[in-house]
């Protein structure tokens, strides 16, 4: 079989016209599909929803062929023989989905293989001709062979699916680093673009430099960052030779947005090693319709989130206090969830389709493998660095990468790897990955020289929608609200008889006395009284370490300027999570 695509971009209509020519020898039905699951997203999505006007033709006879929809996103072509041509149109404008399926704007397009019907059984090369509007330039990331001005051959459909091709109006800055070429491609502009662009690219390359220092080389020769400032482009998805990142409309002029964007750069570039190349074995050849459910995503995403924060400190783009503040606040946020004592990291990974989704009952039933994996990576690194013969996660994970990059890995193999090098670290890892509620982060912070101080504060057990209310997003079943009759989706109307504001609710809860609440549920108005209970969390982190402990941290962070005085408090004001931060009331 051979597979040849022709993709025509229709910018004014925000659509693609796609033709697929399939050549096969056998006579019989042929199944084609659009993915419902793509690497890096790990959820089941209706990617075929925008496809319409699908037609199939036998090229030998010119006859139309019967098409029958099969399943969620597939079609069966009956009577196929020889060469078959499929033709269809696909809508292409939804910035929120852009990182998953691409985007057709009137001025530019990002083209991804998610839009292209494929034959699941076909593992061979595929060819694509891109038909672009006149005078539209094209930027193509690495990973394919260019065979014409706008024609490329890909080793397989999986590579095509993993390659964001940019065309139209874009701004590009190209740098080289340690023999690799880096392209920063901006599909739109924002305030400060002319003045800040070069400085921002400099910062991107500082992140790239510290990533290189981790592994000693880049796993590619050519890499592309695709950036957008569109506020609806909540992008952050890794590809083997590229990534797509949303910076936000003030991503160049607002310090917080800019830092968040650069953290995403660190996260996605680290994925070039961890996930894009070093994969859980279950992801080596995934089913793109039925999905894949590895137990190891706490490694793939959690370790990456850990290095996301650590690399920013090493690059000098955030402060050491930010790193430690996020460790503590991730821990506080995680242990507040009833699910923390119910769901292991491995089970959270296998239930990837539930993760970082907010729904009624999520706090009681799910944890995010990104968050728990980040803390497990810290626990592992801290354990290694405090051994009698110190080791580092930097060096050991680099060796693990080299040993498993070609064949994938299981979490048991990761434990076995550390068992041979650091049995104490391996034992901790084996316990944590399969046992709910088993992090050692607080104790390890103390071993490093910190003094975590806990304080119990009154809590009802409510999480407000978007952290503001008035709608209750979730109710924790281990705290008083979970046994009061209040439900997720209730709209708070009155607090102690006064109109709801978040400030009033927080003040009343902080007094520790029973709180009267009036809520609207559907067409009913209901009254409840809930008595808060004390909920302990780390509220202070003091430095109490000695000179040896301080030198260890300075080396770890690559920041000799980190020099807190004994008894100095580390500010716990930073908590950054692109899946959202929820506050317990």
Image (cartoon, rainbow, N blue to C red):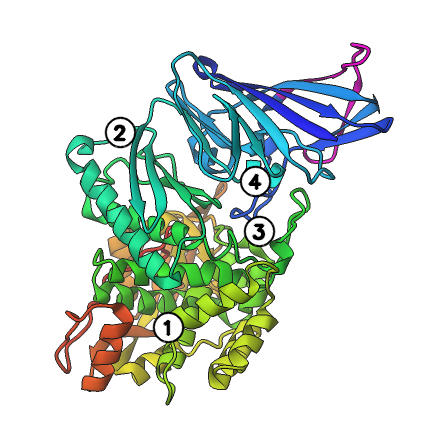
What label sits on residue 533 in the rendered view? 1
Q: Which residue is mark 4?
A: 159
Which of disc 4 and disc 3 is earlier in sequence? Answer: 4
C-alpha gap between disc 1 and disc 2: 49 Å
Q: Which residue is mark 3?
A: 353
- Image depth: mark 4 or mark 2 in front: 4
Magenta part of the chain: 52-73
Which of disc 2 and disc 1 is earlier in sequence? Answer: 2
C-alpha gap between disc 3 and disc 4: 23 Å
C-alpha gap between disc 1 and disc 4: 53 Å
The image shows residue 366 at horizontal and vertical percentages of 53, 61
Residue neighbourhood size for the residue with mark 1, other residues' Cα within 10 Å, grouped as few (<14), some (14–19), many (≥20): many
Residue at (72, 31) in percent of width and height: 32
Of residue 409 and residue 39, the one placed in the foreground of this image is: 409
Instruction: Please identify the quarter of the rendering in which residue 107 is found.
Output: top left
- SS for dot 4: helix
Instruction: Please identify the quarter of the rendering in which residue 411 is found.
Output: bottom right
- Image depth: mark 3 or mark 2 in front: 2
């Amino acid at each position: 079989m051979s597979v040849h695509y022709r993709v025509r971009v229709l910018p004014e209509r925000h659509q693609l016209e796609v033709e697929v020519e399939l050549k096969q020898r056998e006579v019989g039905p042929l199944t084609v599909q659009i993915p419902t699951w793509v690497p890096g997203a790990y959820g089941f999505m209706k990617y075929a929803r925008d496809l319409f006007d699908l037609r199939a033709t036998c090229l030998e006879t010119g006859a139309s062929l019967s098409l029958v929809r099969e399943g969620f996103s597939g079609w069966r072509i009956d009577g196929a023989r020889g060469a078959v041509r499929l033709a269809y149109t696909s809508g292409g404008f939804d910035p929120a989905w852009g990182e998953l399926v691409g985007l057709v704007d009137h001025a530019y397009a990002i083209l991804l293989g998610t839009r292209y019907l494929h034959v699941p059984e076909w593992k061979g090369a595929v060819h694509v001709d891109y038909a672009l509007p006149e005078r539209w330039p094209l930027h193509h990331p690495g990973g394919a062979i260019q065979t014409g001005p706008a024609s490329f051959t890909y080793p397989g459909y999986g590579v095509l699916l993993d390659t964001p091709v940019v065309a139209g109006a874009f701004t590009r800055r190209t740098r080289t680093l340690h023999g690799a070429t880096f392209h920063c491609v901006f599909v739109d502009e924002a305030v400060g673009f002319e003045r800040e662009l070069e400085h921002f690219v400099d910062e991107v390359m500082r992140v790239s430099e510290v990533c290189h220092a981790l592994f000693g080389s880049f796993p590619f020769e050519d890499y592309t960052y695709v950036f957008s400032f569109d506020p609806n482009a909540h992008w952050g998805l890794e590809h083997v030779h590229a990534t797509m990142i949303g910076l936000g409309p003030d991503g160049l002029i607002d310090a917080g947005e800019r830092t968040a964007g650069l953290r995403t750069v660190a996260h996605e570039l680290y994925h070039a090693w961890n996930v894009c190349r070093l994969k859980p074995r279950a992801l080596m050849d995934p089913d793109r319709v039925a999905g894949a459910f590895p137990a190891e995503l706490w490694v793939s995403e959690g370790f990456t989130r850990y290095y996301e924060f650590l690399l920013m400190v090493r690059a000098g783009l955030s402060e050491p206090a930010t790193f430690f503040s996020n460790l503590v606040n991730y821990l506080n946020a995680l242990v507040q969830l009833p699910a923390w004592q119910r769901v292991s990291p491995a089970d959270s990974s296998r239930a990837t389709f539930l993760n970082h989704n907010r729904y009624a009952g999520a706090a009681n039933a799910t944890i995010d493998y990104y968050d728990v994996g980040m803390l497990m990576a810290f626990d592992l690194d801290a354990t290694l660095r405090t051994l009698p013969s110190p080791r580092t996660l930097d060096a050991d994970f680099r060796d693990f990468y080299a040993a498993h990059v070609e064949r994938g890995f299981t979490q048991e193999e990761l434990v076995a790897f550390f068992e041979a090098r650091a049995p104490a670290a391996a034992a901790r890892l084996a316990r944590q990955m399969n046992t709910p509620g088993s992090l050692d982060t607080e104790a390890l912070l103390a071993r490093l020289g910190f003094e975590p101080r806990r304080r119990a504060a009154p809590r009802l057990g409510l999480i407000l929608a978007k952290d503001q209310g008035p709608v209750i997003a979730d109710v924790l079943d281990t705290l008083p609200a979970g046994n009061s009759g209040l439900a997720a989706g209730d709209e708070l109307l009155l607090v102690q008889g006064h109109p709801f504001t978040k400030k009033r609710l927080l003040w009343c809860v902080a007094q520790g006395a029973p709180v009267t609440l009036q809520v609207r549920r559907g067409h009913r108005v209901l009254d409840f009284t809930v008595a808060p209970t004390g909920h302990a969390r780390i509220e202070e982190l003091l430095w109490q370490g000695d000179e040896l402990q301080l030198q260890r941290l300075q080396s770890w962070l690559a920041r000799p300027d980190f020099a807190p005085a004994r008894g100095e408090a580390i500010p716990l004001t930073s908590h950054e999570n692109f899946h959202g931060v929820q506050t317990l009331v």
